[in-house]
Image (cartoon, rainbow, N blue to C red):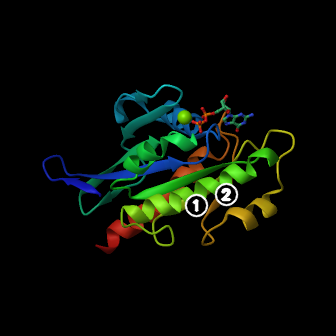
């Protein structure tokens, strides 16, 4: 999408946090929100469904510089993870500029991770996007827990195109900003090509 606002010289980019239910998408967003200076962000908005929430907020990162005099504003979204919310997951991908896939490192969630990446690929394709080319980062979250799958094994199982990959503990913020920066950087490279 990359909505350009000429009046206030802002480029608007949309980043969607994707992944299975309870993998830590909301926790990622909450951490980023807490680390963004209040004057650089807008209110966090929660669109509640019965059992899950879609979170949204936008902010102006201070350290990313400008493109030909325009500043970039990032709009961050989470999707509901449960299988039966596929319609809203699809909708949230409309006009997406970049995706972070949050994988749950617990052994018992590997199947859910694999299924969710397939679902992401499919839903992107329906909007005319391709996971192979869209700015993308992969996060292995919950590294603090017991019974987590070794990182190299998760990489073999989940990496799609040798995307930048990060170990994370979203509850304490480990790896959260690095993941965001990796996808933001790819989006800015794409924008500068235009
Ligand atoms: N131990 C641990 N728990 C986490 C981590 N990230 C998220 N959680 C917990 O996992 C649960 C689901 O997280 P949430 O962000 O709501 O998942 P979402 O469904 O993907 O939005 C919450 O209780 C979080 O506190 C992590 O890195 N380590
Ligand atoms: Mg959530």
- Across and down, in percent, residue 30 comes to 53, 32
- Across and down, in percent, residue 9 comes to 20, 51
Q: Give the mark count.
A: 2
What residue is pinned by disc 2? 114
- Mark 2 Cβ inside 8 Å of ligand 1: no
Q: Nearer the viewer, residue 123 or 70?
A: 123
Q: Is residue 44 above or below residue 67?
A: above
172 relative to 194 in the view: left or right: right
Image quadrant for the N terminus?
Answer: bottom left
Checking the image for residue 34, the label placed there is: none
Q: Secondary structure at mark 1?
A: helix
Image quadrant for the C terminus?
Answer: bottom left
Residue at the limit of the structure toward the right, as seen here: 147
- Across and down, in percent, residue 38 comes to 40, 28
Q: Is residue 26 above or below residue 140?
A: above
Neighbor class of circle 2 (other Cα within 10 Å; few <14, some 14-19, many 20+) is some
Q: Are marks 2 and 1 in contact (CB under 8 Å)?
A: yes
Q: Name which residue lies at 51% across and 72% down.
A: 132
Q: Name which residue lies at 41% across and 36% down.
A: 56
If the picture is divided into quarters, which one holds ligand 2? top right
- Mark 1 Cβ inside 8 Å of ligand 1: no
Residue at the limit of the structure toward the left, as seen here: 7
70 relative to 174 in the view: left or right: left
Q: Secondary structure at mark 2?
A: helix
- Cα distance, mark 2 to mark 1? 6 Å
Where residue 117 sits, quadrant-wise, is bottom right
Q: Is residue 161 above or below residue 106?
A: below
Residue at the limit of the structure toward the front, as seen here: 84
The answer to whether residue 105 is seen in the rendering is yes
Checking the image for residue 118, the label placed there is: 1
Q: Name which residue lies at 76% across and 59% down.
A: 154
């Amino acid at each position: 999408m990359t909505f350009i606002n000429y009046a206030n010289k802002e480029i608007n980019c949309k980043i969607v946090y994707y992944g299975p239910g309870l993998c830590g998408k909301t926790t990622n967003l909450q951490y980023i929100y807490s680390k963004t200076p209040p004057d650089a962000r807008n209110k966090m908005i929660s669109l509640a469904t019965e059992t899950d929430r879609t979170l949204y907020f936008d902010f102006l990162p201070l350290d990313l510089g400008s493109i030909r005099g325009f500043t970039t504003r990032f709009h961050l979204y989470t999707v509901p993870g449960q299988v039966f919310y596929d319609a809203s997951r699809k909708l949230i991908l409309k006009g997406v500029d970049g995706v972070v896939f949050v994988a749950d490192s617990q052994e018992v969630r590997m199947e859910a991770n694999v299924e969710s990446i397939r679902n992401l690929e499919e839903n992107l394709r329906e909007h005319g996007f391709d996971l192979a080319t869209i700015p993308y980062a992969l996060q292995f979250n919950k590294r603090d827990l017991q019974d987590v799958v070794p990182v190299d094994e998760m990489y073999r199982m989940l990496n799609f195109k040798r995307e930048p990959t990060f170990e994370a503990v979203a509850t304490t913020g480990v790896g959260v900003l690095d993941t965001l920066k990796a996808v933001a950087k790819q989006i800015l490279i794409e924008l500068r090509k235009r």
